């Protein structure tokens, strides 16, 4: 059976203690041969709605904490970058550099990420036609000296794309499951289950969300066929400093993964 790419962790590094508590709960996935597991947390959330929103500990302290997760739990690391200069520095710790959805067409950011040895997860923007993600993928591949295109080429060269839904009016996202099929022509596809239920700006200066829809949408994506899943998970989402309304607690996350594995086994 093909390994499921699984990306999970708290939205932002709130503290070393919180990150370690979540990582300890997720270690079973890192040790499970059925998964290609990456621990995810952000050192800086640079695209928050309000200037007063919690952003994280910043680059230097954040990378120290992520490196400590790597050392303590033996996990591979995924984290996002927002500026071109960060790519090289962050790639010294992170195994995967994530390109935020709002920056998925940002050429300089993509090119600098491509110059590193890290894998790259490009999150499709809420505003982007699914077929147009191929141009972002091409920026990575061509920077790495690869002129060929396609799912296998991207996968072999460490490029993923992630679907997190499309803007539907104001303050809402919808997931068009056709996009998973379309995007999979160009690169392995990750379904971003928790961000797909986000409601941008719906909580009065911060994003809201409907976490009760995370599992149904994840099951639907598994049935369509994807290469992996992205979940933000927390010990207590109600107390999370970022994206709490759309995150899953650890127990719900684990139960959801059990179901996704069953679906994957059926369709393969």
Image (cartoon, rainbow, N blue to C red):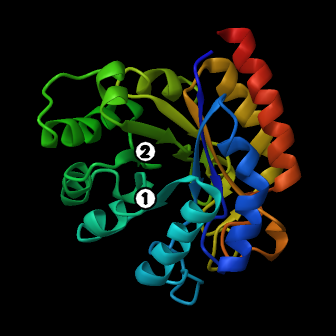
* Image spot of residue 263 (x, y percent): 76, 19
Query: What x and y, as percent, mark residue 134?
Result: 29, 32
Q: Position of residue 110 (x, y in %)?
A: 25, 52
Q: Is residue 198 above or below residue 32?
A: below
Tell me which residue sits at (35%, 37%) in the image.
Answer: 158
Disc 1 on helix, strand or loop? loop
Quarter placement of the N terminus:
top right
Marks 2 and 1 close (CB-CB < 8 Å):
no
Residue 44 shows in this picture? no
For the C terminus, the image quarter is: top right
Q: Is residue 6 above or below residue 80?
A: above
Task: Pick whichever, 205 or 41, lies toward us.
Answer: 41
**How many C-alpha atoms fall within 10 Å of the one at disc 1: few (<14), some, or many (≥20)?**
many
Which mark identifies residue 209? none
Is 56 left, or right, of 92 in this rendering?
right
Write the residue at 70% across / 60% down: 23
Mark 2, secondary structure of its residue: loop
Mark 2 or 1: in front is 1
Q: Is residue 149 visible?
A: yes
Q: Which of the two residues, 61 or 84, is positioned nearer the viewer here?
A: 61
In the image, 237: left or right of 154?
A: right
Q: Is residue 187 above or below residue 160?
A: above
Against 210, residue 153 (above or below) is above
Of the image marks 2 and 1, the number of the one nearer the N terminus: 1
What number is the disc on residue 94? 1
- Picture disc at residue 124: 2
């Amino acid at each position: 059976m093909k390994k499921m790419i699984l990306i999970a962790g708290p939205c932002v590094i709130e503290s070393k203690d919180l990150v370690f508590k979540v990582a300890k709960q997720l270690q079973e996935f890192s040790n499970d041969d059925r998964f290609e597991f990456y621990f995810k947390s952000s050192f800086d959330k640079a695209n928050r709605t309000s200037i007063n929103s919690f952003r994280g500990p910043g680059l230097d302290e954040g990378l120290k904490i992520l490196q400590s997760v790597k050392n303590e739990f033996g996990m591979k690391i995924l984290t996002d970058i927002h500026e071109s200069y960060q790519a090289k520095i962050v790639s010294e710790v992170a195994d995967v550099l994530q390109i935020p959805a709002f920056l998925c067409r940002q050429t300089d950011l993509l090119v600098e990420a491509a110059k590193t040895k890290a894998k790259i997860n490009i999150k499709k923007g809420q505003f982007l036609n699914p077929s147009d993600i191929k141009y972002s993928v091409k920026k990575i591949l061509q920077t790495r000296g690869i002129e060929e295109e396609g799912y296998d080429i991207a996968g072999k060269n460490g490029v993923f794309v992630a679907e997190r839904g499309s803007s539907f009016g104001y303050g809402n996202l919808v997931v068009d499951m056709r996009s998973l099929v379309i995007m999979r022509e160009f690169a392995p596809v990750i379904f971003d289950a928790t961000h797909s239920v986000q409601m941008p700006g719906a909580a009065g200066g911060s994003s809201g969300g409907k976490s009760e829809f995370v599992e149904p949408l994840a099951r639907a994506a598994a049935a369509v066929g994807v290469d992996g899943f992205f979940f933000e998970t927390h010990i207590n989402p109600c107390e999370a400093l970022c994206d709490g309304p759309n995150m899953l607690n650890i127990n719900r996350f684990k139960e959801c993964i059990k179901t996704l594995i069953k679906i994957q086994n059926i369709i393969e």
